[in-house]
DNA sequence: TTGTATGCGTTATCAG
DNA sequence: CTGATAACGCATACAA
């Protein structure tokens, strides 16, 4: 309630407000006589003084807050990124304000406004974009005014918002995965993809199928199943795929199929669906994902995937947002294919 | 840079600063003539006005920020709690400031200071306590002064900090698990526990062994293996246990053993260790955990565990911190045993 | 209902 | 090196 203010400390120490302020935070090139400094610090400690960050923010004209916007903090993909962001933010002496949109794109805008109000120094937005030009345009506009007010922004995802971006090589990663699976001998493929407007899903699907085409393998249209970009989406898509397989078996004979789910949580859903259908992952059907979320460590059989350094993405995005102030720069994140037992080969 | 202030809006709308303020936030019982209100709102929109939360906080004497302190935001246990906290916080119209200590207890104190400086309205601390009285006393003191300054606190964990607490029934849950495993026919047990001072680990271990004792079954001392409270800790502990088993087999004959890891991530590490040792989880040895983190959904065989409603814990802790202002109240969280295929019975 | 004036806690400017 | 004092942007008690 009755908080101790700097004036109290100054009085207690028998110095002026200005001196107390300088003694406690050591303002720029101003310096304070050591003994006075000690007196002030002692007084502050005695009174249990706690600087008011809001008042400081107002006086200084800047805060020490960084905003982080994610789709869902409980999703291992985002919580890994968040771990990187909190680490880098702490290292920079800032605090992070977390906003979890719950997959509601409109909340992104609302949170940007809130962070704007908070005068957050920087904003990191994690999560792939949609192919929805009006929404993207609104977002671009919001970020532009935020930047015009002195804030900096970095997003992890597609570089389409005219701000610093840590981009994931979805096309390249998926293509490499396709070639790796082909290298293991697979000749029949299916893709479990996301909703049509979902850019990440689309890029990964295209990267995968295009690379296969380059190898002379085509993915039949009915073997590309779209669903939600979630674990349950993966489950449903795989269930659907399995039911469609009945037809294929008649036409093509069996052969061993490799299924690419465009992210790991979908792949895990697909693994569950496979088991529930009485088939064995790896033996009856190969499954691969994308992201290499930490969770995979404890999935059996090990899930083949395209590893994305998520924690590092958080760290780098934070640094970009904090350090580079000029034009939008794009950093490409390296991905690497990791083959495990879920795709042993046919 | 040159941010639009409320004065600018007032001038643009041709009203006083006070009227502009009232028109925009609709202060308490004060009301503004509709047409003026519209003029102000229009002016604000035209100028792209964004209220300065720091200035508001100072003028109002309170912020709209809630602080969340967790051990590791990338840990599914904590990210589930965080999901609950962000949801409830958003519902209350507040923002959350996230602090991830990285398992360094001393950071907890530092973050409390920071949140104090920020004048956060409430703080939620998630994570079990240690049996380290000096540290707890420091924490208690820090929280006490925070509360004396008008803040409210809720912790998720042991109710030993004299603040609102969402407590997990570690003893009861572990006991129930013990009885359930005994009911499935297990007669030999082992426990993979955490570091000695870790209260959660200790409570779960004691609840488990005491309940077994009540059933006339004893857990030999060398079948209680202590390690870190992490996945890797579980892996190491299980490896150690397996090596010790060699002796037991000679003494007791084989029989089927049920291993209780005091949390799910340790249990998952234990499952991995079991496989790496060439044994099958469920068949050669039963394994159970505690918490029922979402990750378990995709672990095979399904891990038996004691389910704790983590998201709900986050929601309730947030509500407690926000609503109840008086003396420390303790809410017990219900747990429920979930038996899956990792403990089919001997 | 609207306007005026003051204070919130700090930093920073400008004299001493 | 230190001390008054003016911002900072907004809410509110008080006055009109």
Image (cartoon, coloured by chain):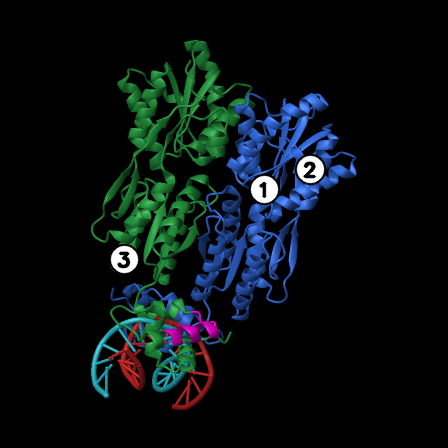
Chain colours: A green, B blue, C cyan, D red
The subunit letter for the residue under badge 1 reads: B
Q: Which residue is under mark 1?
A: B194
Q: Residues within 10 Å of mark 1 (few under 14, many from 20)?
A: many
Q: Quadrant of the C terminus of chain B?
A: top right
In the image, B165: left or right of A313?
right
Q: Which residues are magenta?
A: A38-50
Q: Could you say whether the residue bearing mark 2 is in a helix, strand or loop?
A: helix
The answer to whether A180 is drawn above or below residue A226 in the figure is above
Would residue B107 be visible to someone looking at this image?
yes
The answer to whether A179 is drawn above or below residue B68 in the figure is above
Q: Which residue is under mark 3?
A: A145
Give me the residue at 33% from left, 77% from top. Answer: A19
- Estimate the spatial distance between the alpha carbons at disc 3 and disc 2, rounded to whole Å: 56 Å
The subunit letter for the residue under badge 2 reads: B
**Which tag is nearer the camera, tag 1 or tag 3?**
1
In the image, B320: left or right of A64?
right
**Which tag is nearer the camera, tag 3 or tag 2?**
2
Would residue A236 be visible to someone looking at this image?
no
């Amino acid at each position: 309630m009755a908080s101790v203010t700097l004036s109290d400390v100054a009085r207690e120490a028998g110095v002026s407000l200005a001196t107390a302020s300088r003694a406690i935070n050591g303002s720029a090139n101003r310096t304070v006589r050591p003994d006075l400094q000690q007196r002030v610090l002692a007084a502050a400690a005695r009174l249990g003084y706690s600087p008011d960050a809001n008042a400081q923010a107002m006086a200084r004209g800047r805060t020490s807050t960084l905003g982080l916007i994610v789709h869902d903090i409980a999703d291992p993909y985002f919580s890994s990124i968040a771990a990187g962001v909190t680490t880098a933010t702490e290292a920079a002496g800032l605090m992070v304000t977390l906003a979890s949109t719950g997959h509601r794109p409109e909340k992104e805008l609302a949170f940007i406004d809130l962070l704007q109000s908070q005068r957050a120094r920087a904003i990191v937005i994690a999560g792939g974009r949609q192919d929805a030009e009006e929404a993207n345009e609104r977002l671009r506009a919001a970020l532009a005014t935020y930047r015009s007010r002195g804030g900096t922004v970095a997003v992890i995802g597609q570089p389409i918002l005219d701000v610093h971006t840590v981009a994931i090589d979805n096309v390249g990663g998926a293509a490499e995965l396709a070639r790796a699976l082909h290298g293991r001998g697979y000749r029949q493929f299916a893709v479990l993809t996301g909703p049509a407007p979902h850019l990440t899903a689309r890029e990964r699907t295209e990267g995968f199928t295009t690379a296969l085409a380059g190898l002379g393998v085509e993915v039949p249209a009915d073997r590309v199943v779209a669903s939600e970009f979630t674990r349950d989406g993966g489950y449903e898509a795989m269930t659907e795929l399995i039911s469609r397989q009945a037809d294929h078996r008649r036409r093509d004979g069996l052969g061993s199929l490799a299924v690419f789910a465009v992210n790991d949580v979908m792949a895990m859903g697909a693994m569950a669906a496979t088991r529930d259908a009485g088939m064995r992952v790896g033996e009856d059907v190969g499954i691969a994902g994308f992201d290499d979320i930490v969770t995979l460590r404890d999935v059996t059989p090990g899930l083949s995937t395209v590893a994305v350094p998520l924690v590092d993405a958080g760290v780098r995005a934070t640094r970009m947002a904090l350090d580079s102030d000029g034009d939008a720069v794009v950093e490409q994140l390296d991905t690497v294919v990791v083959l495990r037992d879920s795709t042993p080969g046919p």
